[in-house]
Amino acid sequence: MIEKELTILNHSGLHTRPASQFVKTANQFKSDITVRKGNSVANAKSIITVIALGASKGSKIRLIAEGPDEKEAIEALSALIENKFGEE
């Protein structure tokens, strides 16, 4: 199991378009991936639960991956967040 804490940097946070990118990326991996924000937990492969986290700009989240490609999953999702989902 791998965990990594990140800060949401893009203006719109994890809402519709960025959440869609996030879930699409998460679904490329076999590992179980969850996202924690405070006491809330979301399945990273479900757009409804990711949007329901309400992770806005500046929110701290924790990515948790467990499975055969957990390292690659964390790296790919971290890169999306750190690159602001391609937003300026």
Image: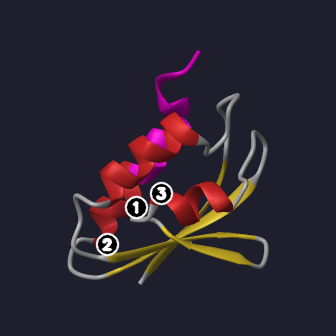
**Residue 54 placement: quadrant:** bottom right
- Identified by mark 2, the residue type is Glu
Between label 1 and label 3, give the one nearer the viewer. 3
- Identified by mark 3, the residue type is Ile
- Residue 47 — which label? 3
The crowd level at tag 2 (other Cα within 10 Å; few <14, some 14-19, many 20+) is: many
- Identified by mark 1, the residue type is Ile
- Residue 70 — which label? 2
- Decide which of tag 2 and tag 3 comes sooner along the chain: 3
| Quarter of the image where the N terminus is located | bottom left
Secondary element type, mark 3: helix
Q: Tell me the residue that label 1 is attached to.
A: 74
- Residue 57 — which label? none
Contact (CB < 8 A) between labels 1 and 2?
yes
Give the left or right position of residue 14, taking residue 54 as reference.
left
Outermost residue toward the top? 88
The answer to whether residue 80 is magenta is: yes
Give the left or right position of residue 88, taking residue 75 as reference.
right
Whole-percent x, y for residue 24 in the image: 32, 50
Residue range in magenta is 77-88
